[in-house]
Structure formats: C-alpha cells, structure tokens
Image (spheres, grey):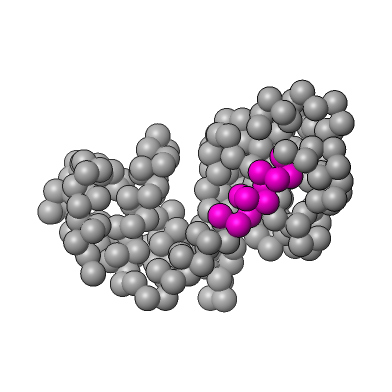
Amino acid sequence: MLYELTNNTHISLSQLSVKKKKPVYRDGSSANGFYYVKSGLVGLYQLTESGKESLLRIYGPGSFFGYRSLFTEQKYPATSRTMLDSELLKVNVNDFSELESIAPNIASYLMREVCEELGEAEKRLMQHTSCSAIKRIVDAIYYLFTFYPSYSWTYREIGEYSGTDTTTVIRYCKTLKQEGYLKKDSRKPIPTDMQLIAEFRQSIV
C-alpha cells in the first residue's frame, strides 16, 4: 500500500512529523483526508460518559487510520494522538468517492479494513459488558504486549484499553507479579513470559 500511495501521481500527500503525545486530529473536527503510519505509534481515544479516556485502537507502522469518517462523511468521533514520536503520511482527499476514482485499490483495501474494525469493535464491546475486570485486564496485557512489545505500557494505558480504572489494574497486576506472570523487579507491568500469559488468559472464565 505504501508503494501505491507514493507512486500514484493523482494522490496528494503531506509528510507529518508529530511529537509524542500530540494530537493528529481531534474529536469533532472535519475529515479532509486520512493517515498512514510510517513510524511510531498512534492511539485513538474517546471520552466515556464518566469523563474518563478510553483507548479504542492502536495504529503502528504500516497502518492507515482516520478513514472511517470519509465513508460516513461525518466529523471525527474520537481523537487520535501519538504515543511515540511519529512519522505520518496524510492522504489529502475530500471524500470516499474521490479516493475511489484516483486510487481504487486503496479504496477497496480500506473498505475491507472498515469491516474488520467494526467486527473487532463489536467483539470488544461484548467483552467490556460481559467479561470480568480480571479477564479484560489479562486480555489487554496479552494483546498490547503481543502486537506492540517494544512500547513501554503503563497501568493507566492498560486500564484505558481494557475499560478498567487504573487502581484496579495496579491492584490486580500486583497479584500477577506475586504469581510470576509479571516481572517483580519492574515498576511497570512487564510479562515474564507471553506463553504463560496466553495460558493463564485461556483459564479465566
């Protein structure tokens, strides 16, 4: 996809260098394109009804984001913010029809991505409403450290991703350290062995 982006003369691209913890776009702003992550890490955040921030999705190198609003022609429903210093490409298009006319392969790819994201969002919603806090925390640890192992995850971010308050995450991670699933000598939650986490995850009802 990157090759097609950079070699399609009909596509208008902007190179962006965004420092850590800076917004790429904000909740409620108008969409006038979408983004590709060349390097770094970007989080998608939304405020809950209680005013707490929820980490909805994470985008690493090779990922597109911010394209769903092109399909719906609505404003962004969440805020994207860098989690690391990031190099991004912004694809400047006004709507999905324009993208489909100048880059049909990319448009088709993003349509499939939208369908997959919707399926994953439904699955996470079911987990948040039907699973215990313990299972959500362990599932979050497994996912975050499996797909983004080089990032230094915090208790707060695990809470934001699992839909659990930070104090509960800290309390349960203390137990996981005592039982050998997380490193005891680290101030941050770091798994000792991902296979152990995977097996423990499967044992939680």
Please, is residue 171 above or below residue 61 in the view? below
In the rendered image, residue 110 lying in the magenta stretch gets the answer yes
| Residue at image location 32% in from the left, 69% down from the top | 133
158 left or right, relative to 43: left
Q: Which residues are magenta?
A: 106-116
| Residue at image location 76% in from the left, 62% down from the top | 72
Q: Quadrant of residue 90?
A: top right
Quadrant of the rendering where the C terminus is positioned? bottom left
| Residue at image location 40% in from the left, 34% down from the top | 150
Name the residue furthest left. Answer: 179
Percent x, y of residue 199: 20, 52
Q: Nearer the viewer, residue 12 or 23?
A: 12
Percent x, y of residue 137: 33, 60
Q: Quadrant of residue 24?
A: top right
Percent x, y of residue 178: 13, 53
37 left or right, relative to 106: left
190 left or right, relative to 70: left
| Residue at image location 63% in from the left, 54% down from the top | 114
Percent x, y of residue 141: 33, 52
201 left or right, relative to 64: left
Let me know if residue 22 appears in the view: no
Please, is residue 40 above or below residue 75 in the view? above
